[in-house]
Image (cartoon, grey):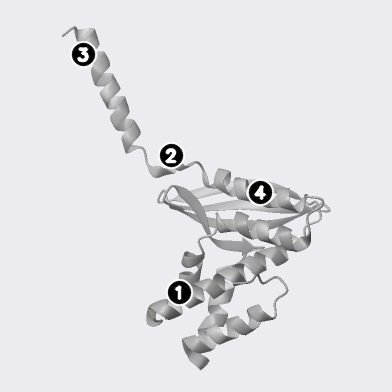
Amino acid sequence: MNSSVSVKASYIRGLLAALLLLPALCLAGTPTEHLRMTIEKVLTVLHETGTDTAAKREKIRAAINERFDYRAMSQSALARNWKKASSDEQDHFVELFTRMMQNTYLVMVAEYNSQAVEYGDETIRKQKYARVKTFIVDSGRRIPLDYKLRLKNGEWLVYDVIIEGVSMINNYRSSYQQIVKRNGMQGLIAKLETKLASSPHSSPR
């Protein structure tokens, strides 16, 4: 075999091997890119004219459902109580907590009045966890809103939102631990059902 052909073949094999060995991080796109897609979908809905509020809420739910890892959020919010819960209790809690997170996000975007969204630094650790800084710019004030994401099946999914330095998941965890301690897992589930039933943002099951 011609030596130049042999070298070229070896080069191509090496290049293919390198491509196959690239970490999922490179193949998936950056956390900021994935997050930006979702935020832009939400902003597009908010700017729609001729769409009623209920329809906008459903579109926003659909957009964030693609980006939020509700099961991971649920596990983190329950902490050690997750493993103590039965399989049925876990599934029921995930369903309720999903609706809680959707409602919380809907409350946040309800305050939107054409403020600008800026993107800050992105930090990645262990090639699968990331934190993306964003800012809501309102009348010259930059309100920090950070998203924590993890890489799962080629997608960067949100598992916590940090509002002005305060973790939403940590807030829920602290509250839920006290409720479970006093009333058990069924007591927490009942409390969430009651709260959701009275929420104007709740969607039908």
* Circle number at residue 169: none
Q: Quadrant of the N terminus?
A: top left
* Circle number at residue 6: 3
Q: Nearer the viewer, residue 201 or 169?
A: 201
Amino acid of disc 1: Asp
Amino acid of disc 3: Ser
Residue 99 falls in which quadrant of the image?
A: bottom right
Would you call the spot at circle 2 few (<14 residues within 10 Å), some (14-19), or many (20 or more)? few
Mark earlier in primary sequence (1, 4) = 4
Residue mark closest to the camera, 4 vs 2? 4
Residue at image point 57% right, 81% down: 175
Mark earlier in primary sequence (4, 2) = 2
Picture layout, residue 184 above or below residue 202: below
Secondary structure of the residue carrying numbered label 1: helix
Residue mark closest to the camera, 1 vs 3? 1
Q: For the residues marked 1 and 2, what is the alpha-carbon distance in whole angstroms?
A: 32 Å
Secondary structure of the residue carrying numbered label 3: helix
The residue under label 2 is 27
